């Protein structure tokens, strides 16, 4: 059940991110007077829609994106000099211009997108990716400032063992009738207790408490814990047991034969809960900036990563844990977080942090300067602005709008490639998944 809840949370927040991305395009477009005929979340058949004002709002069946239809995206034939359509590329561009012109109502040519100035076009097209970046920052603020992140072991007990399990026993070994009772449980310690002092020494860290326990094997000592807001004094007698030698890295030390070194030491049979520490506000933008830079590196090597994914998937090789994942993999991560044996606040932080990184990925990916991505429209607007500025500096007449319809064949090609990569990701996430 927890797995399904995790999947549902991720899917819902992902759809909200997509919806807000499109809001980032729609709001400035309407502010600049462009008529927005459609606002849709998803692709394919329409599941629900409602027209309000001059815009139809709706939800479609395939939740893999969304779109807003801005009237007059491409300039009409006469605005770009009625170029001939001698090749199939020319015919595609002509058809795109004509379809765009048909959306413009009589007397509303001034409300067409192509009529906007370059700065306004940039604001409209960057609005979506910037919205994803803002979502990432907000989610990281909630995680880092509102919830906090694990910062080592606390002095609060996460679990209290019922028996003394040998140091070389498997981690999942259960207690047996022949095991010696654990002194912590015998003394009345409970999960959730916070150790205040041990043998008269104020406890400030788990490492300090561990050293105190190890040094008092076989001795009866007082321990003060905070339980339900009150201090409770107990008496514990740690047993002397063979315990692992812990190295500076926090892991067990091995001997020359690869066996774990042990020493006689006091043992209480308790484990620490993770300490959750809230971070300053400045950590959120720093974390998003770091994630953005890392994502740029991933996008820059995307063809290589896709090729590696295809090879490992179809050759039945082990998949790289740093491999790219698709919607199925992201949903799986959400389910695994939900099913993990973790405090609910930690699960919430995990979901939100993952979704923040997903919004960073949407921000970076949409800025790739290829149509139909937002970055392709940004590049077209910049090119139009550069042409006009060069003409102004040379004292030449102002050139007409850039014929962005020429990029339609490229947009179709990119769309097909992205669709193929999407199908590959779905297949790989099912047959050769990555787990957290």
Image (spheres, rainbow, N blue to C red):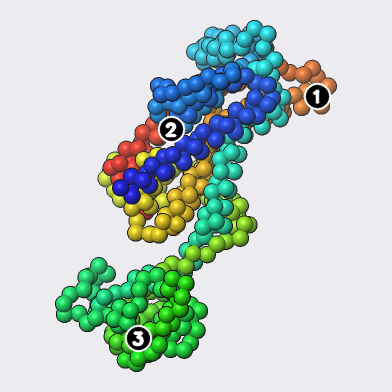
Residue located beneath label 3 in the image: 236
Rendered view: 114 above or below 193 = above
Looking at the image, is mark 3 or mark 1 nearer the viewer? 3
Residue 14: percent from the left, percent from the top?
A: 46, 39
Q: Which mark is residue 64?
A: 2
Residue displayed at 51% across by 33% down: 19
Total numbered badges shown on the rendered structure = 3
Using residue 81 as the reference point, say whether residue 361 is left or right of it.
Answer: left
Q: What secondary structure is marked by label 2? A: strand
Rendered view: 330 above or below 370 = below
* Badge 2 or badge 1: first in the primary sequence: 2
* Badge 2 or badge 3: first in the primary sequence: 2
Residue 320: percent from the left, percent from the top?
A: 37, 51
* Quarter-of-image position of residue 432: top left
Q: Answer yes or no: is residue 260 visible.
A: no
- Decide: few, some or many residues near mark 3? Use Cα within 10 Å; few <14, some 14-19, many ≥20: many
Q: Nearer the viewer, residue 247 or 233?
A: 233
- Decide: few, some or many residues near mark 1? Use Cα within 10 Å; few <14, some 14-19, many ≥20: few
Residue located beneath label 1 in the image: 392
């Amino acid at each position: 059940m927890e797995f399904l809840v995790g999947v549902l949370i991720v899917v819902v927040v992902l759809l909200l991110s997509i919806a807000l991305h499109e809001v980032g395009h729609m709001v400035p477009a309407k502010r600049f007077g462009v008529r927005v005929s459609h606002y849709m979340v998803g692709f394919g058949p329409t599941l629900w829609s409602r027209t309000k004002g001059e815009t139809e709002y709706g939800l479609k069946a395939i939740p893999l994106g969304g779109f807003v239809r801005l009237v007059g995206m491409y300039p009409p034939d006469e605005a770009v000099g009625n170029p001939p359509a001698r090749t199939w590329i020319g015919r595609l561009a002509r058809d795109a211009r004509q379809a765009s012109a048909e959306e413009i109502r009589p007397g509303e040519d001034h409300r067409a997108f192509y009529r906007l100035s370059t700065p306004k076009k940039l604001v409209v097209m960057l609005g979506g990716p910037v919205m994803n970046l803002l979502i990432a920052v907000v989610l990281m603020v909630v995680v880092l400032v509102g919830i906090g992140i694990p910062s080592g072991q606390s002095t609060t007990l996460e679990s209290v063992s019922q028996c003394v399990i040998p140091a070389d026993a498997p981690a999942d070994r259960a207690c047996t009738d022949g095991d010696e009772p654990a002194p912590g449980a015998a003394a009345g310690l409970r999960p959730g207790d916070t150790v205040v002092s041990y043998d008269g020494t104020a406890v400030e860290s788990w490492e300090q408490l561990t050293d105190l326990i190890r040094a008092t094997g076989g001795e009866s000592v007082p321990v003060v814990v905070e339980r339900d807001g009150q201090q409770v004094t107990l008496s514990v007698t740690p047993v002397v047991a063979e315990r692992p030698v812990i190295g500076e890295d926090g892991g067990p030390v091995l001997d020359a034969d690869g066996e774990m070194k042990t020493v006689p030491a006091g043992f209480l049979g308790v484990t620490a809960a993770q300490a959750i520490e809230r971070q300053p506000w400045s950590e959120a933008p720093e974390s998003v900036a770091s994630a953005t830079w890392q994502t740029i590196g991933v996008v820059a090597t995307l063809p290589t990563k896709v090729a590696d994914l295809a090879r490992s998937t179809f050759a039945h090789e082990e998949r790289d844990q740093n491999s790219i994942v698709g919607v199925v993999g992201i949903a799986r991560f959400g389910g695994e977080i939900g099913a993990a044996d973790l405090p609910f606040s930690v699960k919430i932080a995990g979901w939100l942090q993952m979704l923040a990184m997903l919004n960073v990925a949407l921000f970076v990916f949409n800025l790739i300067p290829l149509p139909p991505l937002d970055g392709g429209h940004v590049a077209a607007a910049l090119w139009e602005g550069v042409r006009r500025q060069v003409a102004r500096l040379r004292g030449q007449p102002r050139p007409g709008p850039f014929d962005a319809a020429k990029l339609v064949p490229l947009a179709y090609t990119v769309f097909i490639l992205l669709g193929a990569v999407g199908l590959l990701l779905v297949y790989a996430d099912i047959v050769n998944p990555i787990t957290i």
